[in-house]
Image: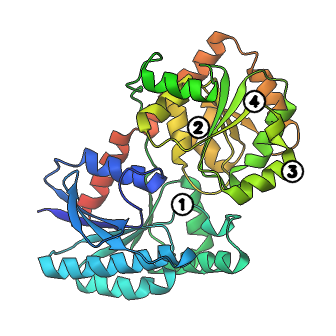
Amino acid sequence: MVKHIYIVGAKNCGAYGGYETFLDKLTEYHSNNKNIKYHIAWKGNSNKEFEYHNADCFQIKVPDIGPAQAIYYDVAALNFCIKDIKRKGISNPVVYVLACRIGPFAAYFKRKIHKLGGKLYVNPDGHEWLRAKWNKVIRKYWKYSEKLMVKNSDLLVCDSKNIQKYIKETYKKYNPQTTYIAYGADLKKSILNDDDKKICEWNEKFNIAIDKYYLIVGRFVPENSFEIMIREFMASDTKKDLVIITAADDKFLKDLESKLHFKKDKRIKFVGAVYDQELLKKIRENAYAYLHGHTVGGTNPSLIEALGSTKLNLLVDVVFNKEVAEDSALYWTRQTGSLKKMIESTDKFGADKVIEFSEKAKARVKAAYSWKFICDEYERLFISNQ
């Protein structure tokens, strides 16, 4: 019997983001699986339907209504799911919602899904209500929405053991049913060689040399510690560059420049976003070390990808990062001087020590975060709900 899984909450499959990468890999690994059929919501400019990795995909047209776009998209996508399940006469579906954006509507959709013999699963993501980009009103909504999503879900699939612990403790009165399945990473090396035209042109464009730069990859938001990392790097005596791959927000960038005056430091290089995954992987491989300042949320995809490809990883000391990397990385605190000292120290590492950390990181990813392992876990989860 084929198990039908409807997934809502990502922009699409394969774009620059955690959920999008997850869906790309999940549908790819299960594209020939006769026991599972995926139905994936995409955010788009039309309402067309198509196939991707053997998954049925449907676009949801979303009006430009500011921060409420995400809520509109989830609600519209769930309405489509319910109509589609009815139209196709599907029995016992699972509707899997990524992130806790639509709490006020959760009870309504749960009733609808249960009437169809289905189950509502939710991935609670990280602490969205802690993100500095939101004002107080929006943060209050995210916290309230999270509570209602937890209360009304049949199962919460947590990508971090610490998020799972937080859900169980914070919402104990609802007796939430939870399970833990992390994100994954690809351990295959980039198909690009060091002398490939694509990487050579990229290096030349930004005047970057192999093994002569520290790297940051991530969303350009305050909770990812950009201010601290740039300030500490500028204070260090390293001769290497700091390469920052992000889609920079102009206002935040101006704020940082007014505080740090980083434009005077030729080592600081904002190079924009890189959407070519093979090129991005090669840039990670060629970095001397990766700096990770994410402080909010569960298992961060960019961290796992860095562990799978970058030799040295210097992470801010928070429980989520320690859970993922364990002893395969080095940890700095947000106190003044901590990261500066670490950069100056790692600059002096010998080849043997660099190789030791690199091998530990790859072993950690292989043991707990390979995409095959993660996708197999999801198959067991979905198939068990017959």
Q: Quadrant of residue 140?
A: bottom right
Task: Tell me the amino acid under the disc marked 3.
Answer: Lys
User: Mark 4 vs mark 2: which is more N-terminal?
Assistant: 4
User: In what element is the residue under mark 1?
Assistant: helix
Task: Give the spatial CA distance, label 3 vs label 1.
Answer: 37 Å
User: Mark 2 vs mark 3: which is more N-terminal?
Assistant: 3
Mark 2, residue position:
325
Q: Quadrant of residue 354?
A: top right
Q: Residue at x 39, y 28 (%)?
A: 188
Q: Residues within 10 Å of mark 4 (few under 14, many from 20)?
A: some
Q: Mark on residue 164? A: 1
User: Mark 3 vs mark 4: which is more N-terminal?
Assistant: 3
Task: Tell me the amino acid under the disc marked 4.
Answer: Arg
Mark 3, residue position:
259
Task: Give the spatial CA distance, label 1 vs label 2.
Answer: 18 Å
User: Mark 4 vs mark 1: which is more N-terminal?
Assistant: 1
Nearest the viewer among 127 and 64 is 64
Task: Give the spatial CA distance, label 4 vs label 1.
Answer: 40 Å
Q: Position of residue 285 (x, y in %)?
A: 52, 25
Can the viewer see residue 251? yes
Task: Tell me the amino acid under the disc marked 1.
Answer: Gln
Q: Residue at x 68, y 65 (%)?
A: 133
